[in-house]
Image (tube, rainbow, N blue to C red):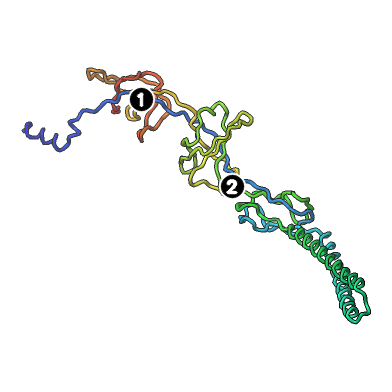
Amino acid sequence: MRRIVLPLLVALFPFAATAEEPFVANAVDVTEWKAVFGRIEARDRVQARSRLGGTIISIDVSEGSTVEKGQQIASITDEKLTLQLNAVDATLTSLESQLDTASADLKRGEDLLERGVATAQQLDQLRTRVDVIKGQIGTAQAERSVLEQREAEGAVLAPIGGAVLQVPLTEGSVVMPGESIAEIGGGGFFLRLAVPERHANYLEEGAEIRIGGDEGETTGVLAKLYPQIENGRVIVDVEFAGMETDFVDARVLVRLPVGKSTTLLVPEGTVSTRMGLDFVTVQSADGAKSQRSVVTGGAHQMDGVEMIEILSGLTAGEQVVTSHE
């Protein structure tokens, strides 16, 4: 009966007859991660400035508003321009009246010249007077166009499309040409970090970055590494999918790769804990097994397998097997 049942069990459950393969503890290079905080920033932060000095009569946006490029966000008026336009209009009315009179005089001069009453010199004087008045009208019209253009520059336009970050002024404020009316952030968003300069040599563009969040860690890419060091820190830009852009300058926890260290790792299942001490089961070359106390470090993940760092109590090349508590 034993000869019949034993082969049958082996055929049905081959793993029961297979000896457990030991794990050879080897020293591997492990990436060291540094936790820092980054800020979500707009790629472009541009000031919408006034082109005309005067008084703000309306502001059509507030912090958080979304604008398109070229959209009017405020209006500025200069009362002196209205007075100048009125003066130019009065000058044009006077010149047009003078032109009508001079044209009538020229017409009569041409009739008198045909009848031999007037001279050609008098007719030339009348024609010159008409040309001079026409030139003055052209000058006044050009001056009016300049004033109209300056008045149109009272419309403050959004230089880029995006979100309004700041509106430092209110309606009724007096502004000078070039003064900022609003700050607009656009061109997309990214995560900006300030990393201590001692880690600069370990950073490289395209490296994988770990970003912490309420729903767990996600990964991003180190998109840009700025060469200039400011106040002992290197500026780094990180991009990742699913970035929350509701609040600009929001802080996000990020883990950066800042170096590598040689570490002895064993699978998590080979470590057991009893009475506050950690043990591993070591298998010798002749197959004998023994328990050994070890000091463990942090947890790591390699190829989807949870690994435990061994600080002391085990050397590279030794074989460990899964612990059975």
Residue plotted at (26% across, 18% down): 284
Between 293 and 213, the one nearer to me in the picture: 213
Q: In the figure, residue 83 lies in which quadrant?
A: bottom right
Report the disc number at residue 234.
none
Circle 2: residue type: Phe
Which quadrant holds the N terminus? top left
Q: Secondary structure at mark 2?
A: loop
Disc 1 residue type (three-letter): Arg
What residue is shown with label 2? 247
**Residue at x 88% of width, y 75% of height:** 106
Furthest-front residue in view? 116
Location of residue 124 (image quadrant)? bottom right
Q: Which residue is situated farthest in the bottom direction here?
A: 115
Q: In the image, is 309 to the left or to the right of 167?
A: left
Q: Position of residue 111 (x, y in %)?
A: 88, 80
Could you tell whether 170 is left or right of 99 in the image? left
Asked if 235 appears above or below 275 in the picture, the reply is below
In the foreground, 116 or 129: 116
Q: Residues within 10 Å of mark 2 (few under 14, many from 20)?
A: few
Task: Please state, as top left, top right, bottom left or bottom right, where the C terminus lies in the image.
Answer: top left
Q: Residue at x 31, y 20 (%)?
A: 318
- Image coordinates for residue 31, horizontal then vertical, percent: 44, 29
The secondary element bearing badge 1 is classed as: strand
Point out which mark residue 274 bears. Answer: 1
In front here: 156 or 251?
156
Between the residue at mark 2 and the residue at mark 1, the CA separation in whole angstroms equals 48 Å
Q: How many marks?
A: 2
Look at the picture and state if 117 lies above or below 45: below
